[in-house]
Image (cartoon, grey):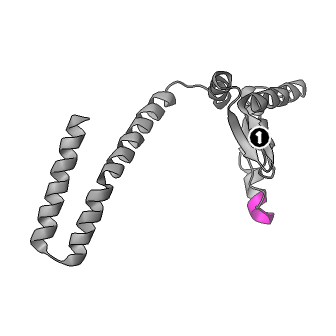
Amino acid sequence: MVCAMVLFLAVAIAILIVTKLLKPKKLWRQGCVTIKTFSNDLRIAWNLLRIKILLSKRRFDNLAVYTQFSKIARKYPQKTAFIYENETWTFSDVLKLSDKVANYFSAQGYQKGDCVSLMLENCPDYPCIWLGISKLGVTTALINTNLVRHSLAQCIRVK
């Protein structure tokens, strides 16, 4: 953290010197704005780097989406997952519906390696159905409801 502050001060001073030497008012104002926002930019860059590192670690876990979601749902069952119109869906609610969907599709004979398409308006049921199907290892092709004619036919034909 000390290193970041020293870097911040060094860059801020360099920007001030360069903008003062060149003297155009517009450049001077831009330099001041840059200095004022630099700490926020540095913090955001640090957070993005942490997220990138976390995601690169997760990429090699080779866990299904449902597995990752169920871990979070079990850790935070009463936290809000979705707010849709006047309804609040907790992680527990989503997990329960996803399990029901998985049981239904399993009873219908779907198994790992199968592929289904899902075309549904945006609502909380959409990710629940997708997660439930994912639990079985079934691949879900998510179809946009705005597609018509040739575009829709192409999405359905492509495997």
Per the rendered image, the range of residues in magenta is 147-152
**What's under tag 1, amino acid-wise?**
Thr
| Residue labelled with disc 1 | 88
Q: Nearer the viewer, residue 40 or 130?
A: 40
Residue 2: x percent and y percent? 21, 35
Q: Nearer the viewer, residue 50 or 133?
A: 50
Membership of 150 in magenta stretch: yes
Membership of 105 in magenta stretch: no
Horizontal relation, residue 125 to residue 44: left or right:
right
Q: Nearer the viewer, residue 122 or 27?
A: 27
Q: Is residue 100 above or below residue 120?
A: above
**Residue 148: quarter of image:** bottom right
Q: Is residue 104 above or below residue 11?
A: above
What residue is drawn where x is 80% and y is 65%? 149
Please indicate, yes or no, whether residue 137 appears anywhere in the rendered image.
no
Tell me the quadrant of the picture where the C terminus can be found.
top right
What residue is drawn where x is 14% and y is 75%? 23
Residue 145: x percent and y percent? 78, 57
Residue 11: x percent and y percent? 18, 53
**Residue 25: quarter of image:** bottom left
What residue is drawn where x is 39% and y is 46%? 44
Q: What is the crowding at mark 1: few (fewer than 14 residues within 10 Å), some, or many (at least 20)?
A: some
**Residue 101: quarter of image:** top right
Quick one: SS at disc 1? strand
Q: Is residue 129 above or below residue 68?
A: below
Tell me the quadrant of the picture where the N terminus can be found.
top left
Please indicate, yes or no, whether residue 35 appears anywhere in the rendered image.
yes
